[in-house]
Amino acid sequence: MAYDHDLADRIRELVASEDGVTERQMFGGLSFLTNGNMSVAASGQGGLLVRVSPDGADDLVDGEHVRTMVMRNREMRGWLNVDDTAVASDAQLEAWVTRGVTYARSLPAKTAKGTARRG
């Protein structure tokens, strides 16, 4: 499954005014990196992938629309899969994108690879 280009455009609009944001195709999706740290992505598996604090991630999981990301049969703490229905409205998407960008900003900056969004 390819990522949802409309979702990617909606994310792009939300992060357009953010400094240090780049885009990079990863894992079949389109990731948005903040200071080199992945913050959110239009997932190649559908929906949104969001990076959050591992300490508070369990509180955000509802088991239906928000799940812990699993990679190679291993749960990835601090990474959430948010399905399309949970980001249908602009307000819902903005809340998740803000979570991801805020957490990524709290991490040490990395050398970013990708296409700069501001220039």
Image (cartoon, helix red, strand yellow):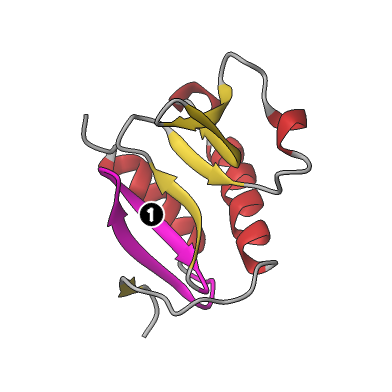
Q: Position of residue 99 (x, y in %)?
A: 66, 50
Q: Is residue 74 above or below residue 118?
A: above
Q: Residues within 10 Å of mark 1 (few under 14, many from 20)?
A: many
Q: Residue furthest top?
A: 64
Task: Name the residue at 51% across, 76% down.
Answer: 110
Circle 1: element type: strand
Front position in the image: 28 or 73: 73
For the N terminus, the quadrant is top left
Q: Is residue 101 above or below residue 62?
A: below
Front position in the image: 56 or 115: 56
Left or right: 41 with respect to 44? right
Please tell me whether the stretch drawn in magenta is mainly helix, strand or loop.
strand
For the C terminus, the quadrant is bottom left
Q: Position of residue 52 (x, y in %)?
A: 65, 47
Task: Name the residue at 58% across, 25% down.
Answer: 66
- Residues in magenta, as a range: 17-35
Say which quarter of the image contains residue 63: top right
Q: Is residue 20 above or below residue 85?
A: below
Return the residue at label 1: 31
Check residue 32 for magenta coloring.
Answer: yes
Q: Is residue 8 above or below residue 58?
A: below
Left or right: 6 with respect to 59? left
Left or right: 109 with respect to 55? left
Say which quarter of the image contains residue 31: bottom left
Task: Name the residue at 56% across, 35% down.
Answer: 80
Task: Name the residue at 65% across, 67% down.
Answer: 107
Three-letter amino acid code at the position of disc 1: Ser
Q: Position of residue 10 (x, y in %)?
A: 41, 48
Check residue 83 for magenta coloring.
Answer: no
Q: Position of residue 56 (x, y in %)?
A: 77, 40
Front position in the image: 43 or 68: 68
